[in-house]
Image: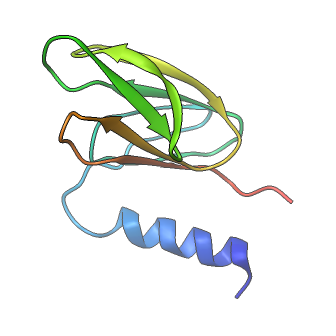
Amino acid sequence: MTKAAAVLALAMTAACTGLERNPSGAITVTVKPGDTGQCAIAPCRILLEMPPGDGEYRVTGNQITLGTYPAGRTVDLGNYYEPQAIEIVGAGVPRAFVYLPITP
């Protein structure tokens, strides 16, 4: 099995594991904490629904700081060519994942 096929199989398995929300889109996807999303085309514009609350949280993608965003809003994280593991640091919520097609 090639690396691309293994990643695709993992993404498909994650999409069939139960009650979690699995949003998808062609070139844009909106996720919230705990979601596993998927874009059909790269680059993919990722929007994130921030958890409710006051103040701001630092958001990371693949452990790289993407910015600081206000609680309770949907924010634009930008366009990406590779899968992202999105964490809202200090919010105590699960990560969101966005899978993108692998291009040679």
Q: Nearer the viewer, residue 32 or 53?
A: 53
Residue 63 place in picture, x, y as percent: 50, 45
Outermost residue to the bottom: 1
Residue 11 place in picture, x, y as percent: 49, 65
Outermost residue to the left: 53
Task: Using residue 67 as the reference point, say whether residue 73 is left or right of it.
Answer: left
Q: Give the colour scheme shown.
A: rainbow
Residue 74 place in picture, x, y as percent: 34, 17
Residue 85 place in picture, x, y as percent: 47, 48
Is 1 placed above or below 101 here?
below
Outermost residue to the right: 104
Placement of the C terminus among the 4 image quadrants: bottom right
Task: Using residue 23 as the reference point, say whether residue 98 is left or right of it.
Answer: right
Q: Nearer the viewer, residue 12 or 54?
A: 54
Dividing the picture into quadrants, the one containing residue 91 is top left
Give me the residue at 28% from left, 24% from top: 50
Q: How many marks?
A: 0
Give me the residue at 38% from left, 62% from top: 15
Placement of the N terminus among the 4 image quadrants: bottom right
Is 36 placed above or below 26 here?
below
Give me the residue at 50% from left, 72% from top: 10
Is 82 placed above or below 104 here?
above
Dividing the picture into quadrants, the one containing residue 48 is top left
Give me the residue at 71% from left, 71% from top: 4
Task: Using residue 16 as the reference point, say whether residue 27 is left or right of it.
Answer: right
